[in-house]
Image: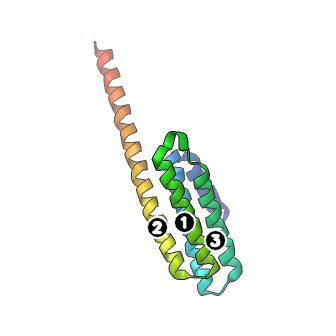
Amino acid sequence: MNRAAQVYRQRAVETATPVGRVVLLYGTAIASVRRAIDAIAAADVEKRVSEMNHVLTVLSELQGTLDFERGGEVARSLDRFYEAMRSRALEGSMYSSTEILEHLATQLHQMREAWQTVDRETLAAAVRANASAADAKRLEVRR
């Protein structure tokens, strides 16, 4: 990756919301799965293994951030999802199965879209709350 791309990625991480960082991690995992699929097509075992190791690392990171105390059943469901994704990633890598990896990428993409929706809704709610607070302050100043 060139220096400009590295700076751009670093800035995206630094300025993202916590949910936005989750979205970025999903994007990273999806990109690695896609590169692993390309590596299988090119019969590049080293690249496939490297990319799938990266996918497993990202899934571990996502799983490791779960807060079971505050997250309750949602956290437990996500934990099961990440375990299933890790199993599929290992299976797809072990058997060099583009079919399994395509399915993995699709599932990760769907989950990423769900997190993007959460991020947009959270940001919209924050904007509305800030606007309401600003309106209340303006009314107070007028009195």
Tag of residue 138: none
Q: Secondary structure at mark 2?
A: helix
Q: Which residue is mark 2?
A: 107
Q: Percent position (x, y) of residue 64? A: 62, 51
Could you tell me if residue 126 is visible in this image? yes
Q: Are marks 2 and 1 in contact (CB under 8 Å)?
A: yes
- Which numbered disc, 3 or 1, marks the residue closer to the eye? 1
- Which numbered disc, 2 or 1, marks the residue closer to the eye? 1
In three-dimensional space, the C-alpha distance between marks 2 and 1, rounded to whole angstroms, equals 8 Å
Identify the residue at horizontal 36%, vertical 27% (top origin): 133
Q: Which residue is mark 3?
A: 52
Left/right of residue 89 with respect to residue 103 in the rendered view = right
Identify the residue at horizontal 57%, vertical 79% (top origin): 37
Quarter of the figure that contains the N terminus? bottom right
Left/right of residue 14 with respect to residue 78 in the rendered view = right
- The kind of residue tagged 3 is Met
- The kind of residue tagged 2 is Gln
Name the residue at the right extreme.
46
Q: Is residue 62 above or below residue 46?
A: above
Q: Which residue is mark 1?
A: 85
Frontmost residue, 95 versus 30: 95
Q: Percent position (x, y) of residue 19? A: 49, 48
